[in-house]
Amino acid sequence: MRGTEGFSGADVMGEEVTLASLLERVKALAQGVESARLQTASEAEAFRVRYLGQRRGLVTHLFKQIPALPPGERRTAGIALNGLRQKAKERLEAARKVAQQQRTAASGEAPIDLTLPGRRQRELGSVHPLTQALRTITSIFEGIGFSIAEGPEIEDDWHNFTALNFGEDHPARDMQDTLFLEASESGEGGIMLRTHTSPVQIRSMLAGQVPFRLIAPGRVYRNESITYKSYCLFHQVEGLVVDEGITMADLKHILYTFARAFFGSGVRLRFRPSYFPFTEPSAELDVWWDLPSGGRWMEILGSGMVHPNVLEAVSIDSERYTGYAFGMGIERPAMLLYGIDDIRILYENDVRFLSQF
Ligand code: DAH
């Protein structure tokens, strides 16, 4: 083993290095740095390469000699070299500024008026948590081949209810307390704020050709009593797939794929029978939500096989084609995901709340 006594004192080039010789070099270089002519950008660049260049810079080279000194002297050498490097950097910086000013002057630009008030940095906004959730949901479905459809927020009774197999006087209409804009002359139906995105199923099927594979995100409205968990407006994403040979297995597969992508692959899911007029059979999807108190099932969407009456309402042969549909609210999953405990805060535009996202 080689101890400090046996130290060779030679640098990589075989040149003998002592603290005295190194400090001598530092002094000489400091004079060069001090007196270098630095009036143009190219002079500044030549200076940088000569003294500070990564491979052949003179200062850089001296740094590489430090390990050749006995350990007790390295600190002194390091301090001297750092001072030299600092001086070289300062000269370089100053020279670059001068060169920049010359360039500005030469290009005829107005010199900067330092007496003008500063420009205030504009506050950066952030994407609303509902929009974030909506974008995540749409990108998951786009990734598995769904297209995006839209429909109006002001709907008529036929698209919102009748074509979706809600009987005229069927109590199912009461499932969605509606905000009517005006009643029709005959007293039935009329114009309303859509209560769900399901009418986009009808509009899309009327406008296109089988097969369908789409989602329809948007706002919906209900005459709700306003509480921490319900509001008069909220958002839904509708889904619709119609083709030959579509089964409930396809529905379940897509919904599970979606839920795992949205909530994480470990999410616990439950598919539970339900009722909707426009699907038969119908099911709801629940996710298990872990809470300090133990956790509980949360319903996140309704779904089912498109009812033959719905297909017939838009002149699709229900003997030949089958389909599935689903509809989910955005607010509830977004609240779960972001830990928001009151739905109303999503619509208040309070910057203190929004800036957390
Ligand atoms: N439109 C239903 C609602 O707002 C949700 C829904 C349930 C949509 C089942 C669907 C479906 O497409 O198949 O309560």
Image (cartoon, helix red, strand yellow):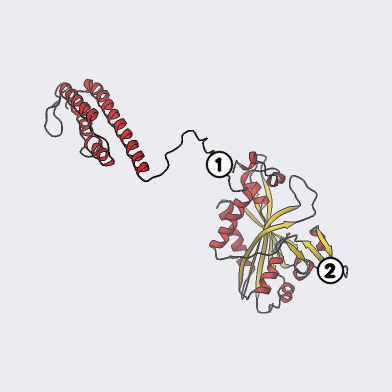
Residue depicted at x 23% and y 39%:
46
- Does the numbered disc 1 mark a residue whose Cβ is under 8 Å from ligand 1? no
Q: Under tag 2, what secondary structure?
A: loop
Expressed as whole percent of the image width and height from the top left, the position of residue 9 reads: 14, 26
- On screen, 19 above or below 197? above
Determine crowd level at label 2: few under 14, some 14-19, many 20+ residues with C-alpha closer than 10 A.
Answer: some
The quarter of the picture where residue 286 lies is: bottom right
Residue 276 in sight: no
Q: Quadrant of the C terminus?
A: top right
Q: In the drawing, does residue 163 fall left or right of residue 351?
A: right
Towards the viewer: 162 or 118: 118
Residues at marks 2 and 1 touching, judged by CB atoms closer than 8 Å: no
Determine crowd level at label 1: few under 14, some 14-19, many 20+ residues with C-alpha closer than 10 A.
Answer: few
Expressed as whole percent of the image width and height from the top left, the position of residue 117 reads: 52, 35
- On screen, 59 above or below 331? above
Residue 70 in sight: yes
In the image, which disc is placed on residue 168?
2
User: Amino acid type of disc 1?
Assistant: Arg
Q: CA distance from mark 2 to mark 1?
A: 54 Å
The quarter of the picture where residue 111 lies is: top left
Q: Under tag 1, what secondary structure?
A: loop
In the image, which disc is placed on residue 122?
1
Towards the viewer: 326 or 246: 326
User: Amino acid type of disc 2?
Assistant: Glu
The quarter of the image that holds ligand 1 is bottom right
Q: Quadrant of the N terminus?
A: top left
